[in-house]
Image: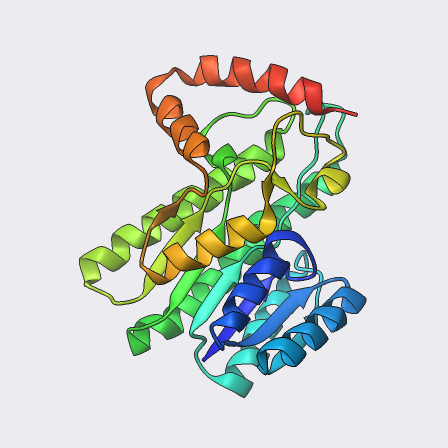
Amino acid sequence: MIALVTGASSGIGRDIARELAKRKYNLIIVARNEESLKELKKELEDIYSVEVDIRVLDLIDREGCKKLYNDVKGKYGTLDVLVNDAGFGTCGDFTKTSLEKELGIIDTNIVALHILTKLCLIDMEKENKGYIMNVASIAGFMPGPLMTTYYASKSYVVRLTQSIIGELKRKKSKVKVSVLCPGPVKTNFQKVADVKFNIVEAKSADVARIGIRKMLKGKKVIFTQFHIKLTRIFSKILPDSFMGFCCYFIQKRKIQ
């Protein structure tokens, strides 16, 4: 069995790789940080006796994403599992945040995920098996003033995944597609986004464990904490303007 995990050098992606290795999946781990990938490769091979293939790639490179897919397919054939975890954010007034950083967010959080999901799903559909899990966020269900681009990108991930699930259901496909929607998680995200969360953060290992377990059970939308699921319910009941109002003041407290 072979699985590909993006964003595997740290945080949720790293712990997802560990969870899959525990289940004896051989792994292709993708990220920019080669040193961190090498450390993870050694750990997984030593502890779980699986094969780990390192791919150093900045996912903002669209052609690089396509090449990654082609190389992996040529070497391993159709993947058993794809986990699109790579992503980052930024915080601040929309008119003052860096345009270049935001374009990087869009390319990583949306475009790279879209490319890999589409290409791998085509193969999985032909074989009528496989799992895809796209890592989004509870942010994908509401407006997010002061983290505008990040929230919008995660909304794309949620809706893309839900739409694919609808198509697969009508085709009676056995391919399982899920979207993982955690709340704040203790990872390197805060440093990259220039924020500091003022609420209790989940542990990435817990999020990864729950995410993989529910993915393999065919759960479509995965929440890893009860209060995050409640937030989703409130976002359906309350007006978007009110949710945006609340998010603005929550975000404002994050800005360092």
Nearer-the-camera pick, 207 or 138: 207
Left or right: residue 113 versus residue 92 is left
Give the vertical position of 198 relative to 43 (above or below).
above
Give the vertical position of 166 relative to 159 (above or below).
below
Q: Residue 118's x, y, as percent?
A: 44, 62
Q: Residue 169's x, y, as percent?
A: 22, 56
Image quadrant of residue 195? Answer: top right
Query: Which quarter of the image is occupied by the C terminus?
Result: top right
The residue lying furthest to the bottom in this view is: 75
Left or right: residue 92 versus residue 171 is right
Residue lying at 39% horizontally and 54% vertically, measured from the top left: 178
Left or right: residue 42 versus residue 110 is right
Residue lying at 41% horizontally and 48% vertically, measured from the top left: 160
Residue lying at 56% horizontally and 20% vertically, measured from the top left: 247
Image quadrant of residue 33? Answer: bottom right
Nearer-the-camera pick, 189 or 212: 212
Query: Which quarter of the image is occupied by the N terminus?
Result: bottom left
Give the vertical position of 143 relative to 87 (above or below).
above
Q: Which color scheme did the rendering employ for the protein?
A: rainbow
The residue lying furthest to the front in this view is: 47
Give the vertical position of 167 relative to 230 (above or below).
below
Image quadrant of residue 75? Answer: bottom right
Numbered circles on residues, count: 0
Residue lying at 33% horizontally and 19% vertically, measured from the top left: 237
Nearer-the-camera pick, 87 or 229: 229
Q: Residue 163's x, y, as percent?
A: 33, 48
